[in-house]
Image: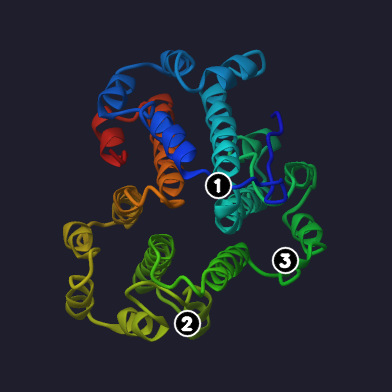
Amino acid sequence: MVSNAVSSSYNLGETNYSYVNTRVRAMESKLFKKDVYIKLLNMEVPQIARYIGEHEYKNEIVNLSSEYRGIELIEHALNENLANTYDKLLKMGGKKASKYTFAVLKRWDIHNIISILRGKFAKVLTKDIEKTLIPIGEIPYTFIQSLLTLTTYEDVIKKLKKIDQFSFLDEHKEIADIESELYKNYYCGVLDKFRKDKKTLFINFIKMEIDIINLRNILRMRRYGFTVEEEQKNVIDGGFYFNIEKLGELLRASDTEFLAVINKTPYGQIFESHWSEPTLFTLEEELEKFLMGYAKKQFKGEHLSIIPILHYIISKKVEVDNIRKISRGKSSNIQNKIIEESLVI
């Protein structure tokens, strides 16, 4: 994979909101609409690659087509394009975007590290792990790539521990615990960074994201059992509707009490619709769709601010996720209706 890594250390110029909004509106107009996703659903994987290569993914498809084919070409092109787009947006935002850069880029560091740890733990082939990586983050992508060359899960953690921000990791812990610690560290860092902006749209989004992660973990613990130690490891403080104390109450509540509390929040309808299903898959997926939909609606307006860039960052991620779901679903012969229901449109 070509490295398009960026970091928060690049030189940012002054923010020109008029210029930024004009550019972002132009980029927004090129995002795929519902009719395009329906069209993609009726294509085979090679046709999907050809189609996106005729639009905003052209450079990546052309550059990578000599090395990859089919679903692998699409996966790598999506990853490269997302990284290139975020790089452009953050630079475009100038100095006013600088404090958001940490929150955006660090998120992809965590994504990449967890992808590598899961892959090494499960002894997945390096080339298959690489397909899941996004070449963007605060950490130089060359370092992320160097983790792929290591043999074991423990070796990856030992190398990460040499970086101050990951010195808290312990290679003797289970992978689920490591993932929890990485997410906690990330969200605590973001909340601390924005502690003076308690009611901004961005911090509200982060807090709702924490809610959804916590609710997902609470559901899993309710279904599969838990210990006090597991409860402490699997919840993150700082959610929008649920603090640590309230999460503990939800964990131990009866089904009726649980739903009564959840129904007082925007998540209620999702739980009511999927509560009786035998698996948690659809409920968790609907919570993720709700979060992305919420962000797309909230990060509109306020044109003399950084909000249009944040809106586009979320919108672009939604587009990439939708294309990925369609192409993976088609390659696995999943029914169109099931794929369509998973899309954020």
Residue at x-position 23% and y-position 72%? 262
Residue at x-position 52% and y-position 69%? 194
Name the amino acid, label 3.
Gln
Name the amino acid, label 1.
Thr
Would residue 189 be found to the left or right of residue 209 on screen? right
Q: Is residue 194 visible?
A: yes
Name the amino acid, label 2.
Thr
Q: Which mark is residue 334?
A: none
Residue at numbered disc 2: 227
Would residue 137 be found to the left or right of residue 296 on screen? right
Residue at numbered disc 3: 165
Ranked by sequence position, the earlier of labels 3 and 1 is: 1
The Cα atoms of the two marked residues, 3 and 1, are separated by: 29 Å
Question: Residue 5, how many percent across, how many down?
Answer: 69, 39
Quadrant where the image shows the C terminus: top left
How crowded is the residue under tag 2: few (<14 C-alpha within 10 Å), some, or many (20+)?
Answer: few
Q: Nearer the viewer, residue 165 or 251?
A: 165
The label nearer to you, 2 versus 3, is 3
